[in-house]
Image: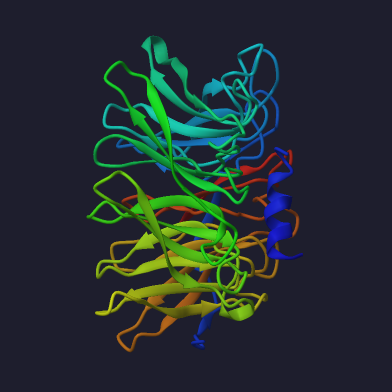
Amino acid sequence: MTHLTCTLFSRTFTVAVLALTVATGAWAQTEKILHSFTNGSDGGFPVGSLILDGKGNLYGTTATGGNGVNCPCGTVFQLVPASNGTWTKNILYSFSSSSTLADGIVPEGPLVFDSKGNLYGTATAGGTNFSGVVFELTPASGGTWTETTLYSFTNGSDGRDPFAGVVFDSAGNLYGGASGGTSGFGLIFELVKGTNGTWTQKTLYNFSGGNDGANPSGTLSFDKAGNIYGVAQTSGAHDYGAVFELSPSSSGNWTEKVLYSFPGGYGGSYPQGGLLWGSAGQLYGIATFNLFELLPDLSGGWTEKTLHSFTGGKDGADALGALIFDKSGNLYGTTFFGGSHRGSVFELSPSSSGTWTEKILHRFSSNGTDGINPGVAVTLDSAGNLYGTTGQGGTSNGGVVFEVMP
């Protein structure tokens, strides 16, 4: 199955050169299922990454299920840990609770908190024009949450299908990517919050499908100067995707610059999942078979370095999500396939010589009870535990929330 097919496959439910050592010996990690979804009132197919609050609670979305009045069209959920090691799942909101589906349906991307504890995210469909929405969830009394639709996409010049979630800038404005747009190859948008609580949509850049890339994928990142960084899944100079930067001008316009175009094959192709900043200004990401690093040089350019190339065997294959760091500088992620079975959770550790060593922390079993095909980033807590989701598998094949413990 090709990478693009994997992408489509994972969405039909709503719808990696340096030679490095692969550690395949005994594992010190243990995997635990925190919740197995039934695709009923508890939701199903959690294809977005998780976030943690300050109390250790987990938050995420499911693309289907729930208690929506008009359709079982997805949920926002919370998992609360207890002292005995068990977890309690709460549904914060069920889509769609509107007869016109105006609240949105099929939430797929990650959530984000603001400073007041409100949650923000995207739904890929629904809304007043059935082209997706950006929503806010606000905690109310009695443990309930109130949903507000901040913006409904029209499938016009503003695009459609905002599946990768949103991020905040320092001023409290929201940014994300969407499909469609004036050229049909996707766009980057901003939502600006007004003094009266309303939000105004602004398109920052429309991709042309040429050397500038097409189909922005994953969450966006900012540098200290306010420039935006992300990945375009396709097109670019070699038609295998690109890493881009968007820079604002004093007039309010934004200029796109391609930092790197992927050559395809084991040189990297079809990046997904967004980018991760290193402490020295590097960018880290995943391009299907490759884990890569982009290093800035004095001339203003960027140099690509492959950290690991997946072989498709026990080390995994087809990494689709983003990477995360721990405090020691190790990288963590997931592969959709490989690991001998149905995907894996991996760690990549740097050495003083500049090479990186991959270690598989968990291989998902062939019977699927521990989950199947993880396709998004994992989340790390202060104790070194990793949390993630799979869109399939579990006792009812509705997907799982899992924990990998050191």
Q: Where is residue 77 in the image (x, y as percent from the top left)?
A: 51, 30
Is 379 rendered above or below residue 137? Answer: below
Q: Coloured how?
A: rainbow
Q: Nearer the viewer, residue 187 or 324?
A: 187
Q: Where is residue 50 in the image (x, y as percent from the top left)?
A: 47, 43
Question: What residue do we see at 40% from left, 10% from top?
Answer: 142
Is 140 situated left or right of 125 in this image? left
Q: Where is residue 181 in the image (x, y as percent from the top left)?
A: 57, 43
Is 399 situated left or right of 88 in this image? right
Q: Where is residue 316 in the image (x, y as percent from the top left)?
A: 62, 70
Residue 103 falls in image quadrant: top right
Regarding residue 151, the answer to whether it shows in the image is: yes
Quarter containing the N terminus: bottom right
Q: Which of 396 and 321 is in front in this view?
A: 321
Is 185 situated left or right of 18 in this image? right
Is 75 rendered above or below residue 363? Answer: above
Is 264 rendered above or below residue 243? Answer: below
Is 400 rendered above or below residue 323? Answer: above
Residue 193 falls in image quadrant: top left
| Number of dots carrying numbers | 0
Regarding residue 330, the answer to whether it shows in the image is: no
Question: What residue do we see at 70% from left, 37% from top?
Answer: 14
Please identify the residue farthest to the front as the structure is shown: 251
Question: What residue do we see at 35% from left, 31% from top?
Answer: 192
Q: Nearer the viewer, residue 80 or 149?
A: 149
Question: What residue do we see at 44% from left, 62% from top?
Answer: 244
Quarter containing the C terminus: bottom left
